Image: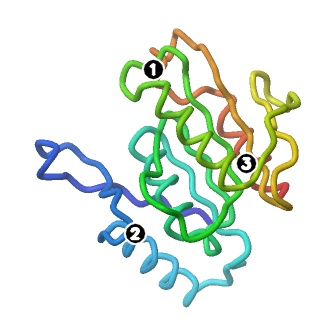
Amino acid sequence: MFVYPDALPLADMGGQTGWDLDPANEDVALFDAILADVSSRLCIDGARVFSTGHSFGGYMSNTLGCARGGIVRAIAPVAGGGPFFPCTGQVAAWVAHGTGDTTVPFSQGEGARDHWLSTNSCGDTTAPVEPAPCVAYDDCADALPVHWCQHDEPDLGGHGWPAWAGPAIWEFFAAL
């Protein structure tokens, strides 16, 4: 089951669409309502709830992983940052960010990676995983892997969705 919510225009962003990243906000409540609604009508495996998104959606995936750890099993933010508040639980995390991203600074992606490495008690060493250029961090807490995909794809302007991201995210989620 796939659900694709769209962000709404934000007044504080001049009407551009985006997500309110405060964990007590209406967008986290929207996630809760969507999950409750879909679960009431369909057979949902509550142990396999995932979130992925690009850019602002990546920020929102980090927010959901942090605010709904224990409900969300894993996240896969692409070209996003955060979370920016204490978390209520842990999630497995697959994080990708382009080194040349001029929309969301690369440091925001590194910050997200570092957050999940710390939260999931991962070690400092890595091993390559498919697809290249991704790596998996060693010694993460049981069943809470963290994968990091630092890439340099100039044809995406540093901020795009790499062609290999979708299949890699699906493989990461399916393995959990």
Q: Answer yes or no: do the residues labelled 3 and 2 have beta carbons within 8 Å?
A: no
Q: Earlier in the sequence, mark 1 or mark 3?
A: 1
Q: Residues within 10 Å of mark 3 (few under 14, many from 20)?
A: few
- Pick the front one: 66 or 118: 118
- Pick the front one: 167 or 117: 117
- From what the image shows, is residue 95 above or below residue 174? above
Left-right relation of 21 to 176? left
Q: Answer yes or no: do the residues labelled 1 and 3 have beta carbons within 8 Å?
A: no
* Residue 155 x/y as whole percent: 52, 11
Q: Which residue is mark 2?
A: 28
- From what the image shows, is residue 79 above or below residue 155? below
Between the residue at mark 1 and the residue at mark 2, the CA separation in whole angstroms equals 27 Å
Amino acid on which disc 1 is placed: Asp
**Residue 39, picture quadrant:** bottom right
- From what the image shows, is residue 13 above or below residue 87? above
x 72%, y 78%: residue? 45
Q: Nearer the viewer, mark 3 or mark 2?
A: 2
Amino acid on which disc 3 is placed: Trp
Q: Find residue 170 and name its label.
A: 3
Q: Residues within 10 Å of mark 1 (few under 14, many from 20)?
A: many
* Residue 144 x/y as whole percent: 77, 57
Amino acid on which disc 2 is placed: Val
Q: Which residue is mark 1?
A: 101
Q: Find residue 76 and name its label.
A: none
